[in-house]
Image (cartoon, rainbow, N blue to C red):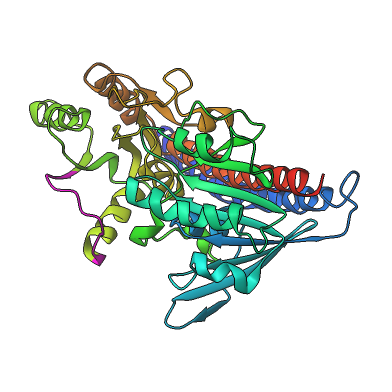
Amino acid sequence: MFTVVKCRLCTICILIAVNIGFIVYLATNVDQSLDDDDDCDRWMDQSLVNGDHQESPINVEVWSKSAIGQYFWETILGGHIESKMMNDLYMEGWKTIGPVRFHFRTGPSLKPESYPSFRPANLVLILNWRSVDKINYANKWLRTLFEDLSGVPSNVGIIALGNEFCNNTWFTDLYVDNGRYRNLRFLFLVYDSPLIDNQLIYQWPLGVATYRHFPSPYTTDDDHKIDLQSSRPYVCNFIATIYQNSSRQELQNLFINNVHNWNHGCLIKTRSKWMANENVESMDSYVQALHSSDLTLCPSGLNVECYRILEAVEYGSIPVIEEIVNTNDHNQCDRIQILRLFKQFDAPFIYVRNWTEQLPDLLTQYNALNLRERVKKRIQLIKWYHHFRIRLRNHFVNVLHKRFVH
């Protein structure tokens, strides 16, 4: 009898050791894998100098007048703000990738009137034209770059936070279709616009809410230090502002009506009024929710793509995304190729079309996973995001080099 008990204890110990060893292996393996990817990253940079890219280095100014510029510079290009002046009214940084030397400038003091002081030959301008007032301000910049009689840049590229309903034809009508502005080399545009042709107009991700000071772990030297191995207290989180007759209200009602029937351990925090800026407490609470949950529910807002998607990814929480385009009559977004960019990059996200029908089964399935299986999914998510940033960065640099040099 003693022998049997001892064997059972040994078996249990072995199983525990194996599981712990597996988790430790995964933890070590993901770090090693990302290190290997860094080697690949360096090789991809070098490849821009080899072969068809043996020309002299080119200098490119990047001027950011939109919050998405910070995500572009720090998270995608891996740059840093190295100089700040006048209480952050002006900031700049430098980064060399292959044959391209970037000089990044941003801040309130950078205005259209600043252009004559610099007159760069190669300029990438990052703009926001989400609303009418933003478009009016963007037009001041565009007229300066395309119509300044005293001299315009030889090459202009634009990265734009487009309208959430993809109503961006004002730009093509004014600056593309008439063929007058031949120094416009490319446009990278946020959201699933039907204008995207991958010849002149390309797609760009929304990124994270830098304007709300979202604490991205990818803008520090502690990259990839998010805890992926520990058990998380919640299967999912649903943190949202609730709008009447929306899918967010459907989700809220779904949880309220099943509060006594479900045992899925989801963290639910809702509010009735949207806040343009978070305070320290609300942002800390939001980030803790992402880091404490295996899944992050992402109901559609004005657009299917929202900041919450990549914010969840950065903390190892898989986005569960509502894959339905807003049916507003003014919505011009592509209703066939929804979330096109993420799908082109094979994002390991979960897509739903009906919360009431699909969420209960999804939560049941995920709740049945053991820690080993959940850790594996988190690591896959973080590795995908690492590859996504590298590939997106090199895609941008390749497009820029091709259009500015050739």
Instruction: Give the residue at x 65% y 64%.
Output: 150
Height in image: 352 above or below 305? above
Give the residues drawn in magenta, as a range.
269-280
Confirm whether the magenta stretch covers residue 362. no
Residue 334 position by quadrant? top left
Residue 118 x %, y %:
64, 71
Instruction: Give the residue at x 30% y 32%.
Output: 300
Residue 206 x %, y %:
45, 44
Residue nearest the observer in this picture, 220 or 399: 399
Q: Which quadrant, please, contains the N terminus?
A: top left
Residue nearest the observer in this picture, 151 or 14: 151
Confirm whether the magenta stretch covers residue 270. yes
Secondary structure mostly seen in magenta is loop
Height in image: 222 above or below 125? below
Residue 163 x %, y %:
39, 39
Q: Residue furthest bottom?
A: 86
Q: Which quadrant, please, contains the C terminus?
A: top right
Height in image: 370 above or below 63? above
Left or right: where does residue 395 sit relative to residue 222?
A: right
Q: Is residue 1 visible?
A: no
Residue 98 position by quadrant? bottom right
Residue nearest the observer in this picture, 24 or 182: 182
Q: Residue furthest front?
A: 149
Instruction: Give the residue at x 48% y 67%.
Output: 111
Q: Is residue 282 visible?
A: yes
Instruction: Give the residue at x 68% y 57%.
Output: 153
Residue 325 x %, y %:
35, 24
Count how many numbered circles sit on residues in the image. Answer: 0
Left or right: where does residue 301 sit relative to residue 392?
A: left
